[in-house]
Amino acid sequence: MNRVTGKNATVRARVFHAPGEPLADEELRLTEVRDDLVRVRLCASGVCGSDLHVVAGDWTFEGPLVLGHEGAGIVEEVGPAVTDVRPGDHVVLSWFAPCRRCGRCARGEAWLCENTKALENTLPDGTTSFYTLDGAPVPAFLGLGTFAEGTVVPQSAAVPINKDVPFPVAALIGCAVTTGVGAVVNTAGVRLGESAVVIGCGGVGQAVVLGAELAGADPIIAVDLSDERLVLARELGVTHALRGDDPDLVDHVRAITGGGADHAFEAIGGAATIEMLPDLIRRGGQAVIVGMPAEGVRVALDPFDLADGGKRILGCNYGNSVPSVDFPRLARLYASGRLPLDRLVGRKVTPDDVDGALEDLRRAAGLRTIIEYGNREEGA
Ligand SMILES: NC(=O)c1ccc[n+]([C@@H]2O[C@H](COP(=O)([O-])OP(=O)(O)OC[C@H]3O[C@@H](n4cnc5c(N)ncnc54)[C@H](O)[C@@H]3O)[C@@H](O)[C@H]2O)c1
Ligand SMILES: [Zn+2]
Ligand SMILES: [Zn+2]
């Protein structure tokens, strides 16, 4: 029996303490399931570039912090005020639990919720999902902490989806897919036959590629520094794959697109690649910043070129998506075969190999590495 089941459940979790240190392997207690809280047994978690930003110290986070924010699992227990899910439901976790009451939420812009506590790594009441066995609170990254066998989240962060969707695919819907596909269809609004260039083809960029294909973009140009990632992008169906360190990159993109792309997507968070965006798009084109830079990064852009060329630079948080609407929609598109999300699932590892999964990100290797959680014997 998995230990997540039952009162005072304890779980194994991978905990960030300080930048550069390996994640610690700790036994933690989950908070009690009260009010509108939901306890979820994790089945799969992706390892995202944003987790790596924390480990690398790009963003200021104090430890301890249960890392991981791209996960899916099964609801085990729900609080008395929960109406949206019940035990046994398969859920994708949202890393930006919306309050559903503020002005932004009321306007259908959950990704801009003004009251979410997710960015403070707590539950809506300010308490934490996890505690040490001594009772000290342990925050969870973006209010989730999916590098653990189980977690406790508000119901707005646990979105039920079709049980036919495999858990690794469901986990990716929790971040990379919703962000990448959303950047294409919600933020950019790509239309049939428009050209798109995707700079950075990791998990998020690969999802941008699938989104661009779904939207009927053509040509689709992938750019990366990793030859392995460029081969994978070709396998996903891009029409062109170019190295990011090619000194003639801009000229190549202009030649392929006839003067500049209609859309460019930056899925790295790098100053140099963001600064390149205006040169990659045509007059009147638009570029979307999807990658999240390290704290303090500044870029230099030529405002005359932007104004004169009528070019637009847009920011994109969580694919401008509403989890309760977009997670099930993406799952349906997968189930109907129109969005082959299983093609984004990479190497599968056990929770013992989270460090190896982070290393895959550092090396820009493969498709998204997925942590799979099996049942753990009591006392094991
Ligand atoms: N906007 C959002 O809501 C959101 C959501 C999730 C992730 N992110 C961010 O998106 C970024 C990407 O995440 P990921 O999980 O795909 O990471 P990743 O590490 O898997 O992918 C990054 C890719 O960029 C490539 N790259 C790096 N420098 C390059 C360069 N100069 N030219 C071309 N390619 C280059 C790498 O080789 C790698 O393939 C991260 O910054 C992450 O924090 C943003
Ligand atoms: Zn992420
Ligand atoms: Zn809100």
Image (tube, grey):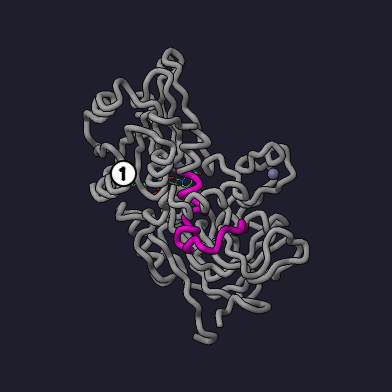
Residue 64 can be seen in this image: no
Q: At 49% from the left edge and 60% from the top edge, which residue is drawn?
A: 165
For ligand 1, give the image quadrant: top left
Residue 162 is a magenta residue: yes
Q: Position of residue 289 (x, y in %)?
A: 45, 35
Residue 291 can be seen in this image: yes
Q: Position of residue 78 (x, y in %)?
A: 70, 67
Q: At 72% from the left edge and 39% from the top edge, which residue is drawn?
A: 106
Q: Quick check: 233 above or below 25?
A: above
User: Counting other residues with Cα less than 10 Å from the Cα at mark 1, is it few (<14), some (14-19), or many (20 or more)?
Assistant: some
Q: Nearer the viewer, residue 58 or 107?
A: 107
Q: Residue furthest front?
A: 336
Q: Residue furthest top?
A: 308
Q: Quadrant of residue 48?
A: bottom left
Q: Amino acid at mark 1?
A: Gly
Q: Nearer the viewer, residue 75 or 102?
A: 75
Residue 142 is a magenta residue: no
Q: Give, as a single range, the part of the protein colored magenta.
A: 158-180
Q: Quick check: 110 above or below 144?
A: above
Query: Is 182 placed left or right of 7 in the picture?
Result: left
Query: Is 361 placed left or right of 230 in the picture?
Result: right
Query: Is 23 placed left or right of 114 in the picture?
Result: left
Q: Which residue does the numbered mark 1 point to in the structure image?
A: 237
Q: Quick check: 225 above or below 192?
A: below
Q: Position of residue 298 (x, y in %)?
A: 44, 33
